[in-house]
Amino acid sequence: MARYTGSVCRQCRREGTKLFLKGDKCYTEKCPMTLRHTPPGMHGQGRKKQSEYGLQLREKQKVRRAYGILESQFRKYYDMATNMKGVTGENMLSLIERRLDNVAYRLNFGESRPMARQMVTHGHVLVNGKKVDIASYQVKVGDEITIREKSREIPFFKTLREEGAKRTIPQWLELDAENLKGRVVALPKREDIDLSIEEHNIVEFYSR
């Protein structure tokens, strides 16, 4: 599977906003977005105003990079959203939010989405007591997400048990940090997504 192996901080600079791909570093003064907020490349400071197509493309790329999704996967989420009742853009974001790697991140089982994805693919995460190592797995209301017994002594999880969650847990999830146990209590709503996203631009991009 294709995977970006360059500096993830360049992706934040390219999209002009923090995508929180480096965990705690994103909240410090060492964050490249704080030090150099212009797009990467020798022409970054001199780029002209974007066209309507360019704005739509950048919005799509921003969401893709924030959640770590390939183009083919992202297009599938859009196609699924168009066949659902309700607003297409909100449906698409709800589907993406319900990915297991994102849920693990939201539950503080990883400092960043890439780290949470690694926890999932390495088999540290259980869904309803069964190992699920597929990052794109769609959780449902009532699902219980836990850390397997053998993985609980990893220093990161020991710190989570002792100190609790570093980030706020969204309302559609519940977390028992002491027992490394989370539960999906509702479907994510538009207001639960903390990234600055103009999803109508993505819908317009794919509707061209």
Image (cartoon, grey):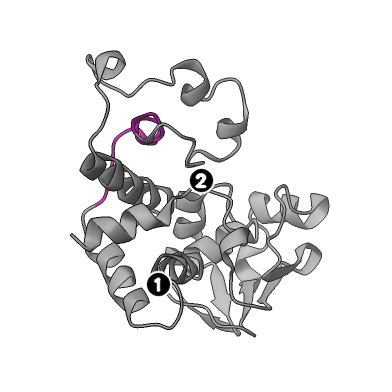
Q: Write the residue at 23% across / 14% down.
A: 42
In the picture, the quarter occupied by the C terminus is bottom left
Residue 137 in which image quadrant: bottom left
Q: Measure the alpha-carbon separation of dots 1 and 2.
A: 27 Å
At 67% across and 56% down in the image, what residue appears? 157
- Indicate the amino acid at tag 1: Ile
Does residue 4 show up?
no
Q: Does the magenta-highlighted stretch encompass residue 5?
A: yes
Mark 2 = which residue?
196
Question: From which residue to which does the magenta span run?
Answer: 3-14
Residue 114 drawn in magenta: no
**Cβ–Cβ below 8 Å for labels 1 and 2?**
no
Label at residue 134 = 1
Q: Where is residue 206 in the image (x, y as percent from the top left)?
A: 23, 61
Mark 2 residue crowding within 10 angstroms, few (<14) / some (14–19) / many (20+): few
Q: Is residue 97 something that shows in the picture?
A: yes
- Is 36 left, or right, of 71 in this rendering? right
Which quadrant of the structure image shows residue 175?
bottom right
Which mark identifies residue 178?
none
Q: What element carries label 1?
A: loop
In the rendered image of this protein, does residue 153 appear above or below residue 139? above
Residue at the location (54% across, 67% down)? 124
Task: Name the one closer to the observer, 17 or 102.
Answer: 17
The reply, left or right, for residue 44 in relation to residue 197 is left
Horizontal and vertical percent position of residue 71:
24, 58
